[in-house]
Amino acid sequence: ILHMRLSALPALLLMTSAALSAANAHAAGTPRDLSTVRGFNFTPAAADAHEAFWLNYPAAEIDRDFGYAQQLNLNQVRVFVRSDAWDQEPKTFTESLNKFMDTAERHHLGVMLVLAPSGKQVDGLTGEAQAASDAKLRAWVVSLAGIVRDKPAMAFWDVANEPDWPGYADHRRPKADVEHRMNLARMFADTVHANDKKHATTVGCFRVGCMEELANYTDVLSFHDYPPTIARAQANIKAAQEIAARHHKQVFDTEMGCIGRADPYDMVLREYKRSGMGFYIWELMITRFWGNVHGVFYTDGTVRDPVIAAALMGFFRNQTKDTTLEDPDREGWVTASVAAAKQWLAEPNPSWEKGLNIAEVQANLLEGAQLIAMRNPPAREIVLLRQGSQDIPALKKIMERYTSLLEPYEDHPPLHPHTAPIE
């Protein structure tokens, strides 16, 4: 991975002296051009929370997962480091962080470390209690810098994750807590700049506008984007690029992609590819906490949706008027399978194996011609039936459904030589 060029920042740009030192530094793990970043957020699939795996490090699992990332040509990993884990067992945490950085290097992944103090160390504190907590957190950041600043895989410090987040609509954060988090972001950035002269800082802003407030403390700009429409994605990208241009800094997105927010990965990745902006998806693995709305890979290397993997590789569905629709009965397979299914359904003692074969042909026609939603793929239904005990009523129910879906596509063509009997 090439060095990053940050020395082009103009002399008139307001920055702390520490930030200027970091801006002129070079780091092996940091790409020169942020548009080349193809990253992912990471938590092991089996971990209960961000901090859990640092104290019980699953070395083989992480090595395997980074191999999956390599298959998609991903080149950066964003990971949360929690003060909770450090406070509990600093020695164990240090050993785990070293292993993580070394594994990332072996897989040619740059690492973005996200500083994530616990809420009890940040929110609701005042006076001496707040000052003492801030001092402890500053010492934690200094210790982390000592561990990673010479690691070849180290790329970026995200010194604060969404410090501008106002809370959920029914449980807003007090303004004082939000302001304290913004101030912590500034303090963490200065602390990193003073203790790591090699690596760039950023803040993963919840909203694009937060980048403007913290631009003087960060070497590169970043934000999170879960747009529900193409127009919103384009507007957010444009706003981010305008802020970056005003501050003469590079910008990228460090969180994107959520099924539950009407933000499908292929839609948002298409827009970021068009814009030439680097990205990190949330997230690589289908995890315990976020797995029902985020993630690409299951632990066995299979994927939730091949469309996501294709989009990460830069391949997208055709959306033009020139789309060629499939003709599943061009060679008579729909007609033949519907006839075979009706005959099997009419038999008093139908063969389990023959019924499975007919249903599998129908499943393949439905999937291959994109005639059915893929939330529960038909081929999966057949695989699960084959793995279980014989259940003729369940198979009949499935075959009746497949037949009703295929009947509208019957063209009744002359049987083609490739139309083999279904046995």
Image (spheres, helix red, strand yellow):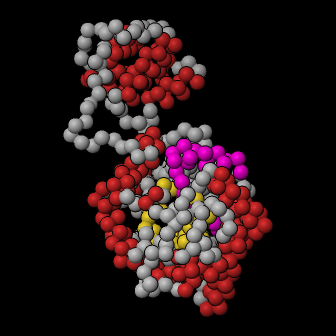
Instruction: Give percent across and percent down for residue 140.
Output: 68, 76
Residue drawn at point x = 39 percent, y = 29 percent: 367
Residue drawn at point x = 59 percent, y = 79 percent: 193
User: Would residue 346 be seen by someone viewing this image from the given angle?
Assistant: no
| Picture layout, residue 136 above or below residue 59 | below
Instruction: Give percent across and percent down for residue 77.
Output: 56, 57
How many tags in the picture? 0
Q: Considering depth in this image, is 28 or 80 the residue closer to the camera?
A: 28
Q: Considering depth in this image, is 164 or 396 the residue closer to the camera?
A: 164
Asked where in the image residue 30 lies, by quadrant, the reply is: bottom right
Please state, as top left, top right, bottom left or bottom right, where the N terminus lies in the image: bottom right
Is 76 included in the stretch rendered in magenta?
yes
Residue drawn at point x = 52 percent, y = 62 percent: 31
Left/right placement of residue 272 relative to residue 160 reads left
Instruction: Give percent across and percent down for residue 409.
Output: 27, 22
Left/right placement of residue 21 relative to residue 313 reads right
| Picture layout, residue 12 above or below residue 287 | below
Residue drawn at point x = 54 percent, y = 64 percent: 3
Q: Considering depth in this image, is 158 or 394 the residue closer to the camera?
A: 158
| Picture layout, residue 309 above or below residue 350 | below
Left/right placement of residue 417 relative to residue 383 reads left
User: Which residues, given as a range, are shown in magenta?
Assistant: 59-82
Is 70 included in the stretch rendered in magenta?
yes
Asked where in the image residue 145 lies, by quadrant, the reply is: bottom right
| Picture layout, residue 95 above or below residue 335 | below
